[in-house]
Image (cartoon, rainbow, N blue to C red):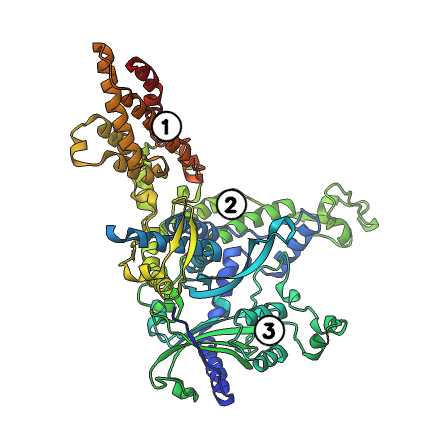
């Protein structure tokens, strides 16, 4: 197994790497207002743009229990549309098992099964789905998203048998290896802005990100890199001070940035960074802990750079040839780790993409930005309607302060009585107060205009209410509804195809090559095949395994409609000519798999089919002998009995898989009724010969 090559930097080389990282980070921060734009989009997404004093006071009053104050209304347009498109992306890319399907020629099916098993296990253990969900949401909000794909080793706990331990079980630490995906937090990610986002992994010079580490997490990282980090370097990292600018500042490139989007979060993360490690360490009895000057928090920067090592004074093989290196920098002061990446793909392992790419790079509006103005206009109309209702409740009037006191006329009690001053005695009270005429006939038109703006927003992003789970009035046949939804998903499909071309195609190549290069021998359980799969790296490297090419289309968009599915089943069951040109059983299994029901666990093995054919032949012979009154040799009866016993053993060994969420949902639909019928019919076919075999055997005897 080939490994990446770690290198110990000298003092001058270390300072060169730190300076290079600082300049790379500043190149993005100083030339582009990226964080400001990200914050603006997030505030629109969360409907937290209105920070005016009036709205803030109304919100505080509502939170304190005063429901008479009315806040300004922000019409929800961006978030519903983003989440609707996100649901499509998740359904298109993240519902399969494994997430990346593997196919090969028939001669290398075993290697393809091994590759598929490894990918499925990596996806579950490393939590791919969670990372890719956030990755897709970033792309829809910002029109820029990134994901890191690297081969990692982790210490995991397993249980082994030990007769000397309680319950004969003892925990054991083992090393897990596999592909790990990590979504990039764009607030703390930097990259080469001189190339197209989709080409950063191949043409870019650098890409990296920053994370916050506690003392224990940093210690865990160093332990996982055991043997690669000298003790002196680890001590310098632990004792290095944080950046002068606290988290959330923008003056220092090595300062972790925490945006302020929600003014009322469940917990303010900045306050969680204030754990006083030194106060705790002073009470520690461990002399080693008291000897090291630990810090409260560590800012760890991960940098991938395509460099010439000679530029940094690094004397390594091929020092004048461009090479991909990985650096871990703690607090912008200590290069904790420097390693040349000898991966076969030769990528910067951070893949960026733009769901809406039109050649304008970072000027292209995102899916969310396209309708930000529509949300403002619709909200403005709604607030105009609310302002009219506010005036209706508390209208403006003119009053004579010599006759009516201010606190009396401005009383918030709707049932309060208003006394007049003595100066108003003997005068008409109506002359002390004058109410402005108020007419409210046209305010409803504001709501109609707001609804029209919402429809404009749906038109801009090619969304419709049905995609957002909203009821739409009107009678439509199933064909008409599917036709409307098929055209309505066109925009989402284009974004899915773009994500496949920009990110998933190179990332799948990275996953495949990492497995071929680093995967050790192992035994992994494949839950789809219900079997243990032995991983043989030599067989993987010899086989011509390749990934299926996904086009970003969800299975529902590619499958047959319900009417076509029922018609196909009827034709297959009633046309003997089809059996001459097709294998009917695999064809039916494939059709049901398109509908979400997997019938492969119920397919008969070749041995079972052969035994059933022999059973039918022997039963025919016994039946003919019984009709003619001919006595047959007893060996035939014994042979039939042995066949029946073997069939019973096969039936007992057949797995009974638990229904998946998809198949369970399909049971309530008309399309899955054929699946249940086919399954029951297959069981009856297996039991029918066994029920008829005993009388025939007795007749033969």
The label on residue 645 is: 1
Q: Mark 3 packing: few (<14 Cα in 10 Å), some, or many (20+)?
A: many
Count of numbered circles on the image: 3
**Mark 3 highlights which residue?**
298
Q: Which residue is situated farthest in the right direction here? A: 422
Mark 2 — residue? 443
Label pair 2/1, CB-CB below 8 angstroms: no
Q: Looking at the picture, does residue 641 appear above or below residue 561? A: above
Mark 3 near mark 2, Cβ–Cβ under 8 Å? no
Q: Nearer the viewer, residue 168 or 243?
A: 168
Where in the figure is residue 677, as x and y percent of width and height? 35, 27
585 left or right, relative to 649: left
Numbered disc in front, either 2 or 1 = 1
Q: Earlier in the sequence, mark 2 or mark 1?
A: 2
Q: Earlier along the polypeptide chain: callout 3 or callout 1?
A: 3
- Looking at the rendered structure, the secondary structure element under dot 2 is loop
Tell me the quadrant of the picture where the N terminus can be found.
bottom left
Left or right: 292 with respect to 581?
Answer: right
- Can residue 374 be seen by looking at this rendering? no
- Residue 602 visible from this viewpoint: yes
Q: Earlier in the sequence, mark 3 or mark 2?
A: 3
The C terminus: image quadrant: top left
The Cα atoms of the two marked residues, 3 and 2, are separated by: 56 Å
Q: Residues within 10 Å of mark 2 (few under 14, many from 20)?
A: some
> Which residue shows up at 30% across the image and 45% down it?
487
Label 3 SS: strand
> Marks 3 and 1, Cα distance to the nearest angstrom?
68 Å
């Amino acid at each position: 197994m080939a490994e990446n090559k770690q290198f110990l930097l000298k003092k001058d080389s270390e300072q060169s790497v730190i300076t290079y990282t600082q300049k790379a980070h500043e190149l993005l921060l100083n030339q582009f207002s990226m964080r400001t734009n990200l914050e603006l989009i997030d505030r629109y997404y969360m409907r937290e743009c209105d920070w005016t004093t009036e709205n803030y006071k109304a919100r505080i009053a509502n939170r304190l229990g005063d429901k008479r104050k009315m806040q300004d209304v922000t019409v929800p347009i961006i978030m519903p549309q983003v989440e609707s498109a996100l649901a499509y992306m998740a359904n298109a890319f993240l519902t399969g098992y494994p997430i990346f399907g593997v196919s090969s020629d028939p001669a290398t099916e075993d290697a393809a099964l091994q590759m598929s098993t490894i990918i499925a296990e990596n996806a579950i253990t490393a939590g791919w789905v969670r990372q890719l969900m956030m990755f897709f949401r970033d792309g829809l909000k910002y029109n820029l998203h990134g994901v890191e794909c690297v081969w990692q080793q982790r210490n995991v706990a397993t249980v082994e048998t030990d007769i000397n331990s309680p319950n004969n079980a003892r925990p054991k630490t083992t090393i897990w290896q596999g592909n790990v995906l990590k979504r990039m937090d764009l607030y703390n990610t930097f990259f080469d802005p001189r190339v197209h986002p989709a080409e950063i992994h191949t043409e870019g010079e650098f890409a990296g990100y920053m994370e916050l580490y506690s003392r224990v997490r940093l210690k865990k990282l160093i332990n996982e890199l055991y043997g690669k980090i000298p003790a002196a370097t680890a001590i310098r990292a632990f004792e290095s001070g944080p950046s002068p600018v606290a988290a959330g500042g923008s003056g220092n490139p090595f300062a972790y940035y925490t945006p302020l989007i929600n003014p009322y979060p469940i917990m303010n993360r900045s306050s969680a960074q204030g754990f006083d490690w030194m106060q705790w360490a002073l009470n520690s009895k461990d002399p080693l802990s008291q000897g090291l000057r630990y810090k409260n928090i560590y800012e760890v920067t991960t940098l991938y750079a395509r460099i010439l090592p000679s530029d940094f004074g690094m004397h390594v093989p091929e020092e004048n040839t461009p090479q991909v290196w990985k650096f871990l920098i703690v607090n912008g002061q200590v290069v904790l780790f420097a390693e040349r990446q000898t991966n076969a793909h030769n990528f910067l392992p951070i893949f960026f993409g733009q769901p809406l790419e039109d050649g304008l790079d970072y000027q292209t509006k995102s899916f969310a930005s396209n309708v930000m103005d529509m949300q403002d206009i619709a909200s403005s109309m709604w607030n105009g309607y609310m302002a009219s209702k506010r005036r209706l409740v508390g209208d403006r009037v003119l009053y004579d302060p010599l006759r009516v006191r201010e606190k009396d006329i401005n009383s918030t009690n709707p049932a309060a009585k208003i006394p007049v001053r003595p100066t108003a005695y003997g005068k008409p009270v109506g002359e002390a107060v004058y109410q402005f005429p108020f007419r409210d006939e046209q305010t409803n038109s504001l709501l109609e205009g707001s609804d029209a703006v919402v429809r404009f927003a749906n038109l801009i992003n090619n969304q419709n209410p049905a995609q957002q789970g909203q009821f739409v009035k009107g009678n439509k046949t199933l064909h008409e509804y599917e036709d409307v939804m098929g055209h309505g998903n066109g925009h989402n499909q284009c974004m899915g195809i773009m994500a496949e071309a920009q990110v998933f195609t190179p990332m799948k190549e990275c996953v495949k090559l990492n497995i071929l290069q680093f995967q050790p021998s192992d035994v992994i359980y494949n839950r789809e095949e219900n079997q243990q799969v032995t991983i043989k790296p030599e067989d993987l490297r010899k086989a011509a395994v390749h990934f299926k090419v996904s086009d970003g289309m969800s299975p529902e968009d590619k499958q047959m409609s319900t009417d076509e599915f029922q018609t196909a089943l009827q034709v297959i069951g009633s046309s003997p000519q089809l059996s001459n040109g097709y294998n009917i059983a695999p064809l039916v299994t494939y059709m049901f798999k398109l509908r979400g029901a997997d019938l492969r666990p119920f397919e008969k093995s070749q041995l079972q089919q052969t035994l059933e054919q022999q059973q039918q032949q022997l039963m025919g012979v016994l039946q003919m002998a019984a009709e003619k009154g001919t006595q047959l040799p007893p060996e035939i009866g014994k042979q039939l009995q042995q066949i029946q016993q073997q069939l019973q053993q096969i039936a007992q060994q057949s797995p009974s898989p638990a229904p998946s969420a998809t198949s369970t949902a399909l049971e309530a639909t008309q399309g899955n009724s054929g699946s249940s019928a086919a399954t029951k019919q297959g069981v009856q076919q297996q039991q029918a010969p066994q029920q008829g075999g005993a009388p025939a055997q007795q007749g033969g005897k």
